[in-house]
Structures are given as C-alpha cells and as structure tokens.
Image (tube, rainbow, N blue to C red):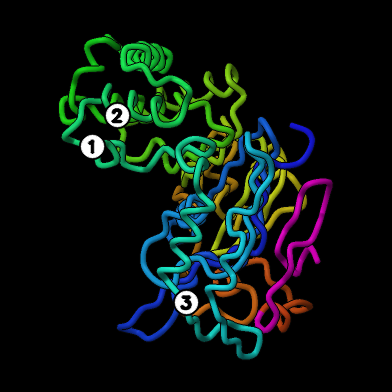
Amino acid sequence: MTGAPVLAIQDLRTYFYSRAKQAFVRSVDGVSLSIARGETLGVVGESGSGKSVTALSVLGLVGGSPGVITGAIEFAGGAGRRNLLQDLGRYVTLTEQDGRIVAVAKDEPGWRAQLERSMTGVRGKEIAMIFQNPKSSLNPFLTVGQQISEAIRLHTPVKDPKEARERAIAWLERVRMDSPRLRFDQYPDGLSGGMCQRAMIAMALACEPSLLMADEPTTGLDATIQSRIVALLAELKSELGVTTLLITHDIRVVSRLADTVAVMYGGTVMEHGPARDVLAPSFPAKHPYTAALLASLPSAQQNGRAHAIDGRLSVIRGEVVDTMDVPRGCRFYPRCDRVTDAIRARCMSQEPALATVATGHRIRCHLHG
C-alpha cells in the first residue's frame, strides 16, 4: 500500500435537478477520497449520504441531469494514470451565487460522448463493480456462465469460447460456488441471492481489474449468507490484494475488510482515516457523527450501561440532512450533541474544512479545526 494512489477523487460534485421542487439535489457535494494500491477503503454512512452515487460517478453510470458537474477522478490502471473526467468541464457551465452553484447548463450529448471516450478500456476491465442487488444486476435471459464468459472475452486476451468457459468455471470455483459446472449453465432466477452474489463477484474479478468497487455487497441477504460473503471477500482480499472501494451501511463489514474508512454525511466526507482509529470508540479525535454511528451499534464493547438509556440503544436524534437544502454551516450541526458555546456560531454559519488530526486522518469539524 505504497506509492501513488490507484484512485484519487478531488472535489467531486454530482447534482440532480428536481423539477417538482425546482432545486438541486446535492447527492455528492465536494467529495475528495484516495485509495492506495492494495488497500480497501470502506465508505460508510446513513442512506442518502452519497456513497453509491460517488461510486457510480467514478464509472460514469449516473443517469439523470445534470449528473457529474465538477471535480477530477485520477485513476492509475494498466494504461497509466489518467483523469476520467478529462475535458468534461468544457461541456458544463456553472452559475454561482454566494459561493454556491445555483444553475447548471450542460451539453448532455457532448458530455456523454466525451465520457464514453474517457471510459474506453476502463469500465468493466480496469474498474469492475459489484452492484447492490445481484438478482437484478444479472441478465435474466442469459445463463450465469454466458455472462461471465462474455466479460472474459471482452476484457481479457482470452477470445476462444472454450477457454473462456473453463476460466469462468475456475472463477466460480474460486468464489466457492457449489457445483460450479452445474451453476455455469443455470439462469439467475434458478440461483439463490447468495449464489448470484458469488457469480457477480466472479464476473467482476475474472477480468483482473485494477480497482474493484463493491456497493452494499451483503444487502438483501440473510445473516448466515452475509457472513459467508464477507468471509469470501476477506479471503479474496488476502489472496489477490485487489484495490477495493467498499460501500456499506454495515460498520461491522467495514471493520473486518477495510484498511481505511471514509464517513459520509449529506453528500460529503466527514471523517477519513485508518480503520483502526476511525472505528475505535476510544480514539480521542473523532467526528461527532462517527461517534454517534459507533454508539448506535449493539456490541459487547458498547454495553447498555455506557451507551443506552433504560436498556435501549443510542440513536442519532433528528432527521438526515435534506441535500436540496444544505445548511450554510456544518451539515451535522442540527443533530450534533457535542456543540459547545465556543464554536456554536461557526457551526451555524461556516462549513468546517477537513482538518488533519493525525497522519492520514482528517476530520470535518470545528472541534478539531
């Protein structure tokens, strides 16, 4: 985990326009992240915090308008380092007022054509993705084997159908699919959710990507299957050392798989640092939102006496910030229970910057400015 990062996201903004409310949904609003080679970065946060849209923005899979409007995504793959958003800025005109984007004019056809040129040889080959719902992500009209074989023939030097078939079966075996030759000829509807997820993992890894993005890889699976999928991902991480962006709302999955953690809220990063520090309740430098997430987890370390009232688990009071009406100050301020009189005025009016509190550890909070 040394050298230049495989993926470096700088000031990424992905907005959507709500015609009903005539306002922008700031799904991703100034996100900056980086992943070193061989590292697993876990991205956590409540639903609606912008985790999945960040990943989809990297691959250029954002639908709707305006979509990605600013930022840089530096990616170092087999073809060298490149900015996946190179030259896209010339297709977007922004209007700002009081430091905020209030209007976007976008040449959608030109932007999309340039994006597809930028993504040539990247999507599926250099960057692979495991989507949230494996059943709906697989083509119901093709067998699992056909889909994996097609990916192999498209994105690797293997072009012979028989060789692609054997390689696909080998990957199904590697992800611990039972009876891989039988499953190769089955359709997704004939497989369980856990089997479909293993098939998705096999298809993603079969092209030996430089970066794997896993978006909620255990969502929709029962507890036993979730545990097995996490164990499989941990085993593959140890064997292959693939660089991974792991998106999940399950902090336990992150604590098992991630080397570094980014905590997102309201479309931006609140804390980013080594997993051992970010996920340690006793670590002194911690964003109030991260602390609140950790306190809401039932665990042996966080027992009822220390983290619950009347035997109930702690909860984060209030509602998740509305990304169509982001406050001027700290996005977490209305729900924060650690605001002091010394910083209250700043919390209400000034958004904190990501401040370095330790080597590789940054926090967006006036308490740590």
Q: Position of residue 198 (x, y in %)?
A: 36, 25
Could you tell me if the residues under marks 2 and 1 are in contact, i.e. CB atoms within 8 Å? yes
The residue under label 1 is 139
- Mark-to-mark CA distance, 3 and 1: 32 Å
Check disc 2: other Cα within 10 Å, few if <14, some if 14-19, many if 20+: some
Q: Position of residue 78 (x, y in %)?
A: 63, 34
- Mark-to-mark CA distance, 2 and 1: 8 Å
Residue 147, label in figure: 2
**Residue at position x 44%, y 50% from top?**
312
Check disc 1: other Cα within 10 Å, few if <14, some if 14-19, many if 20+: some
Q: Is residue 12 above or below residue 339?
A: above
Q: Secondary structure at mark 2?
A: helix
Q: Is residue 265 visible?
A: yes
Of labels 3 and 1, earlier in sequence is 3
Query: Which amino acid does the dot numbered 3 rest on?
Result: Lys
Q: Position of residue 150 (x, y in %)?
A: 33, 28
